[in-house]
Amino acid sequence: MAGCALGRSLGRRFRWFWAAYTVSAFGTWLAFDAFALIAILALDAGPAEVSVLAAAGLAVGAVVAVPLGPWVEFRRKRPVMIAMDLIRFAALMSVPAAYVLGGLSFAQLLVVAVVVGAADIAFTAASGACLKALVGPEDLLVANGRFEATTWTATALGPPLGTAAIGLVGPVTSVAANAVSFLLSAAGIRAIGGREPHPAPTAAPPRPGAGGLLEGWRYILASPALRPLFFNTVLVSGLIMATSPLLAVLMLGELGFAPWQYGLAFGVPCIGGLIGSRLARPLLARFGQHKVMLTAGTLRACWPLGLAFIGPGPTGLLLVIAVELGLITCMGVFNPVFATYRLEQLPSDRVARTLSAWSITSKATIAAMTGVWGLLAGLTSPRTAIAIAGLLLLSTSLLLPRHDRTPQLKNADQAPERQPLA
């Protein structure tokens, strides 16, 4: 965001919410790929097992979260968010506890990944609706920019520090730090203060289970504005994340990079996220929302193919940094503009269900693609699987909307709600 936007005051209650988001974001990125690193370094897992770990946690977590979206819609949001933070704290703390006692297993990592994945979805659905009470519609892009800048700052600093801690202290250090961050996040949300009213009842409250989420999916698929972005963002996330465990195996195994080098390769490029988030507002003012989304969304798909050409040593490390810098800069521009645009299309009484449906689809797609790419890497090699994903990513720009045909919601009662980007 531009300096004037970052300096704009959104109030004490928003600052507490932002602080809670900041501490949990830093904790999450301190634990960047922590389960994959634990599986590789402590449990001697191979490419297939690492991919299964990444996929199973997302897939089962998404299934468990199916009834949560409709349930969250008509609950007070801050208690839900605090509960999800505490659940994530307890689940993650079980990992270092089991490691210290000598009982850590691959099965436990799977269970914890499922619990955390389901809690993530419920927290995301609640946080979007929570922010509506704290930030007016005119400040939505400013708030999005702050969350985006925070995300990339945490992403830049977290992985190098987390992987350095793993190398110095042990493989579960960053998981413990992540657990504590959720405890602090719960305290920050509690500190927002004020009385949160119960959501107003409606004549047709959302049905529990998949039936309620179907309304969210129907709304997305019926919207000319949201439908192409839905398919684009889900596929882009799936293809990028499917190669993450393979890249870890390739760099830490075959190419012999140290954990701190692996963290550095993904931490330094996050400077691009800060640059992109600061550019988003002036670019939006000059070129318009749709053109910025189309251009940045297209460019972000062009970079990952370069990861297939990584070699050992400093040259390989510099190639990873360059590719990730280009990718993340484009994402830093795209993400806050996309998040604002998406929420501008959502009426207030559909936010939690629609965001839950979107998030569950994204996580399930990432899980499926991660499993498929793990098998593909086993049949070929991690490098070949990364190259195929990069080639497929080039085609995802065809799914971006070429024309903005849907007007934004104008009614103040339909003001959008925002989910943090973590």
Image (cartoon, grey):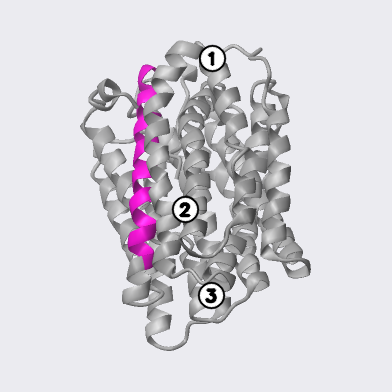
Q: Amino acid at mark 2?
A: Leu
Q: Amino acid at mark 3?
A: Ala
Quadrant for the C terminus in the image:
top left
At x 56%, y 81%, the residue is 44
Check the image and report above or below for 51 versus 282. Answer: below
Main secondary structure along the magenta-highlighted residues:
helix
- Where is residue 146 drawn, in percent x and y? 34, 33
Disc 1 crowd rating (10 Å Cα; few below 14, some 14-19, many 20+) is some
Mark 1, residue position: 409
Q: Which mark is residue 318?
A: 2
**Range drawn in magenta:** 137-163
Check the image and report above or below for 253 versus 199. Answer: below
**Res. 141 image quadrant:** top left
State whether residue 207 appears in this view: no
Q: CA distance from mark 2 to mark 3?
A: 26 Å
**Residue toward you, 310 or 176:** 310
Mark 3, residue position: 39
**Res. 242 image quadrant:** bottom right
Which is nearer the N-term, disc 2 or disc 1?
Answer: 2
**Residue toward you, 213 or 102:** 102
- Where is residue 308 drawn, in percent x and y? 64, 54
